[in-house]
Amino acid sequence: MKASAIEGGEISKRLAPRKRLKRGLSIVDFILRIVAAICTLGSALGMGTTKETLPFATRFVKFRAVFDDLPTFVFFVTSNSIVCGYLLLSLALSFFHIVRSNAVRSRVLQVFLDTIMFGLLTTGASSAAAIVYVAHYGNPNANWFPFCRQYNNFCERISGSLIGSFIAAVLFIILILMSAVSISKR
């Protein structure tokens, strides 16, 4: 009887560090989700409120750039908004993982949904990055001239929005890897 009690105590001592590791990863997961939500919200708001009118516009002709002139930027704002909403809703599941660190099925679901949102965020950011590149440097082969020389503020804001979105994409990679580690450490 004493030998089995000793073995049971040794097993619980070995499980304690794993449980602390899972709880620590869950807390970091919760914090990273908040940071990623802030990044995607900032990117969506930054791009969604971007517009600039050139000062040499006449009363009849105005030269202006607005984000919704380009469908790629509309997709960027939409994808960042969807991912931000998902991140805010997933905070509840992330908090559940702090309380119940042994939950495996919900972590698998969260990894699956995180991967889908990562794909959506990456496609939105990558497509917008291609347009921003053309805006900055143009394409002489296609006779597309860079227009960032005229619309400086517009280009600075859309470039800043891209930075926030790519930071959120990197955070998603970290979140997915941390969830995979939490699932594998049973």
Image (tube, rainbow, N blue to C red):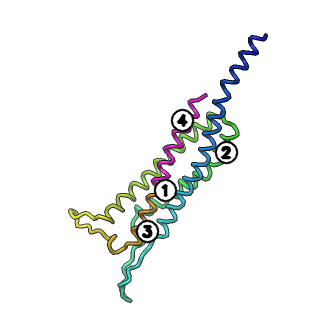
Query: Quadrant of the rendered structure where residue 9 is?
Result: top right
Secondary structure at badge 2 equals helix
Disc number lying in front (2 or 3)? 2
Residue type (three-letter) at the residue carrying disc 1: Ser
* Badge 2 density bin: few <14, some 14–19, many ≥20, Cα 10 Å: some
For the residues bearing labels 2 and 4, Cβ distance under 8 angstroms:
no
Q: Is residue 179 magenta?
A: yes
Work out whether mark 1 precedes mark 2 in sequence or the reverse, and give the earlier one: 1
Query: Quadrant of the rendered structure where residue 76 is?
Result: bottom left
Say which mark, if any, is on residue 180: 4
Residue wearing tag 2: 95
Residue type (three-letter) at the residue carrying disc 2: Phe
Question: Residue 111: x and y, percent?
Answer: 54, 40
Residue wearing tag 1: 79
Please tell me which residue is depicted at 58% across the width and 34% down the height of the picture: 182
Residue type (three-letter) at the residue carrying disc 4: Ala
Secondary structure at badge 1 equals helix
Between marks 2 and 4, how big is the CA–CA gap? 17 Å
Please tell me which residue is depicted at 43% across the width and 59% down the height of the picture: 162
> Vertically, is 166 above or below 21?
below
Question: Residue 179: x and y, percent?
Answer: 56, 38
Magenta stretch? 166-186
Residue wearing tag 3: 68
Secondary structure at badge 3 equals helix
For the residues bearing labels 3 and 4, Cβ distance under 8 angstroms:
no
Disc number lying in front (1 or 4)? 4
Disc number lying in front (3 or 4)? 4
